[in-house]
Amino acid sequence: MKRESQAAYADPADYARLSEEALVVHQRSPVSANDSLLVFVHGLGGSRYGPGATWGRFPAFLYDDLPEVDVGMYQYRTAAGRWAWTRSIALEDEARVLADLIRDQLKAYKRIVLIGHSMGGLLCKATIHRLLETGEHDALKRIAGLLLMATPQLGALRVPAWLGAFSFDARALRPHGELVRKINLSFENHIALDERVSTLRRTTIPTWAVEAVYDRWVDSLSAGIGLTSSRIKVVRGSHTSIVKPDDRDSDVYAWVRERIGIALDRFKYDVFVAAAMAGHSGDAEYADNRATVLAMIEVLKQRCGYASVFYAGATMPTMEDFDPEELALRKDMAALRESRYFILFYPKRIVSSVLYEAGWALILGKPAIYIVGDDQDLPFLMQEASQAFVERRVRIFECPDRASVLERLTAYGPELFDASAA
């Protein structure tokens, strides 16, 4: 992987020397502060740079319009590029390369949107399949969205079946072929395509598709399989023209940019903090508990990098300020659904609805941390919550006082919810 520091997007002056670099990341300073990345993946016979580049001005428009986002350009061998046969690999193996890049070199990016054209869309899906297959849940959760541009998700009917015996590309594009079948089964069983869905059973990766009405390579069914009509943009254009918008007023560009925004801003809050409210013996105990939570929030923002934290008591200094129960429930549940992570603050055994919220966080598949004075104060099943999942979805921190809570959060910093840091 290579990084290019640029004030405005442009092909690297010596892009030919980068031909063996799988990914080139364009960023605005040598040390990018951005935590969001777009990755463009070309299709059969495509290229990322030069006069015949697949994407035209698409990356440049987005680089200008989204200053908080870096742009990555992926390159791999297809078509004539495969004449260097000793360096030619199957699409499934290329997916292993991209999956490892996402897991390792791109670890600093919290949100990655994959944008694939034609066979490049299949490569993006194969990469997600690979991360599922190898159980790389942390990397998978950082994929914030997937945009499929004229992608033959069921294979391409115009590719002769016999060509698969001689060509990696034809093998990958064979209608209902082995790779296509495996990818689609993975998505059907393990991926939720709608950003409004949050569940323990599936990883949510908001997915959309663009279909060209003059496309002679990818039929309508193959382009949009598995997606509702509201997640498919149908435009006039050919297989290749739809990824080369003339200007920012292009239907495709405006629609894709809006979907990128939805993917990157899926969560309104980084962290939901559940702390007891009405169960306290009086204002003094509530105020002390609230002061600890507010101190925690300050650490979460300043030391851990979580800019947006929801805590129901943030604007309620006394117990008299509480909302009516029904209103509080509606507000809390809406905020929980819109939060990426969950923290239960439970310093002592108390009758409180925070345990109900912790249960819902499990149902919604939120990575969670329980901060307790003594884990024996938790209900019996919650004491072993960290052992209940294949991946480490729940961790328990025993902290006897405020100082130890803040020290523990500070020690983890930005890796607080990284299971590998446990």
Image: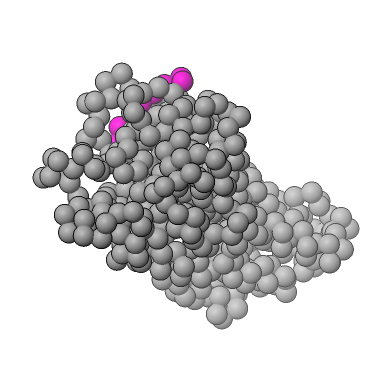
Q: Quadrant of the N terminus?
A: top left
Q: Is residue 83 magenta?
A: no
Percent position of residue 201, x then y: 51, 70
Q: Residue at x 49, y 55 (%)?
A: 220
- Name the one closer to the observer, 381 or 130: 130
From the viewer's perspective, is residue 29 above or below residue 351? Answer: above
Q: Magenta residues, as a range? A: 1-8
Q: Is residue 6 magenta?
A: yes
Q: Quadrant of the C terminus?
A: bottom left
From the viewer's perspective, is residue 359 above or below residue 331? Answer: below
Q: How many marks?
A: 0
Q: Residue at x 24, y 43 (%)?
A: 79
In-image side of 78 versus 194 (left or right) = left
In-image side of 42 versus 164 (left or right) = right
Q: Residue furthest bottom?
A: 380
Percent position of residue 369, x then y: 54, 61
Q: Residue at x 48, y 59 (%)?
A: 221
From the viewer's perspective, is residue 125 above or below residue 390? Answer: above
Percent position of residue 95, x then y: 30, 52
- Name the one closer to the observer, 235 or 35: 235
Observer able to see residue 359: yes
Q: Residue furthest left?
A: 86
Q: Residue at x 83, y 62 (%)?
A: 327
